[in-house]
Image (cartoon, rainbow, N blue to C red):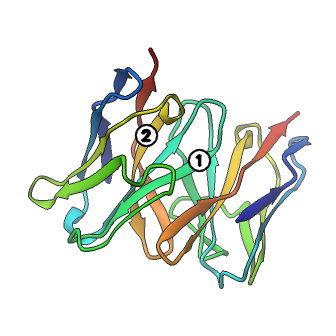
Amino acid sequence: VLTQSPATLSLSPGERATLSCRASQVISTYLAWYQKKPGQAPRLLIYDASKRATGIPARFSGSGSGADFTLSIYSLEPEDSAIYYCQQRSNWWITFGQGTRLEIK
Amino acid sequence: EVLLVESGGGLVKPGGSLTVSCVGSGFNYYTYTMTWVRQAPGKGLEWVSSISSGSGHIYYADSVRGRFTVSRDNTKNSLFLRMDTLRVEDTAMYYCVRETPLSLDEWGQGTLVTVSS
């Protein structure tokens, strides 16, 4: 089980967002983060806990290991408004967190 | 450019059946595990099923096991999800996803399945 916090985050442009994802057991570093906007497919941001996917700006940063992971988004921009999901694969099944809604004021 | 294009969604009555499809292009389709992920209206992402490159390993979420069947045709770069005994709670956007060892790295735009009487 992946538990994300907070459920909602409301910040202003230029600020930093810190999103948390906690696993119910140790999952090494197989942890990915996705951005989901309405009407669009999810987009991979971070894989292997800290590696940015192709084309993802350096403002997006992942960290953590074991059971605690963080997605940091620096210098927030209006287009960062979205729901962010963490995801893990454990043996044969895939699990997503419940999501964090990021609102840009 | 990697492209995944889903099709086959629509309106079906509870208890009915539907097959959704996905065609991949721009990559060596036959070498990748492929996955279906869905998102019900107002809900989060939910993994549905995965199938390995050669179809030797197939996995399902508990919520669909016994009702859904995933398959692929590597000669046509195609992925299928046959859905039987559909329930209202299966209503969702269904995404076809390319899987790597560490992520779900490419997603289609999705096909909408609505189960309603």
Amino acid type at mark 1: Leu
Q: Nearer the viewer, residue B19 or A36?
A: B19
Q: Name the image quarter holding residue B112.
A: top left
Q: Residue B13, image x and y in percent?
A: 38, 20
Residue appearing at x 66%, y 31% in the figure? B42
Q: Earlier in the sequence, mark 2 or mark 1?
A: 1
Q: Name the image quarter holding residue A12.
A: top right
Residue appearing at x 60%, y 77% in the figure? A30
Amino acid type at mark 2: Tyr
Q: Name the image quarter holding residue A27.
A: bottom right
Residue at the far left in the pictured view: B75
The image quadrant where one finds the N terminus of chain A is bottom right
Name the residue carrying label 1: B45
Q: Residue B76, image x and y in percent?
A: 11, 52
Depicted A31 relative to depicted B72: above or below: below
Q: Residue B110, image x and y in percent?
A: 41, 37
Check the residue under mark 1 and report the chain it is in: B
Name the residue carrying label 2: B94
Q: CA distance from mark 2 to mark 1?
A: 10 Å
Is residue A59 shown to the viewer in this render?
yes
Is residue B92 shown to the viewer in this render?
no
The image quadrant where one finds the C terminus of chain A is top right
Depicted A87 relative to depicted B83: above or below: below
Q: Secondary structure at mark 2?
A: strand
Depicted B88 relative to depicted A59: above or below: above
What number is the disc on residue B72? Answer: none
Q: Secondary structure at mark 1?
A: strand
Residue appearing at x 71%, y 83% in the figure? A26
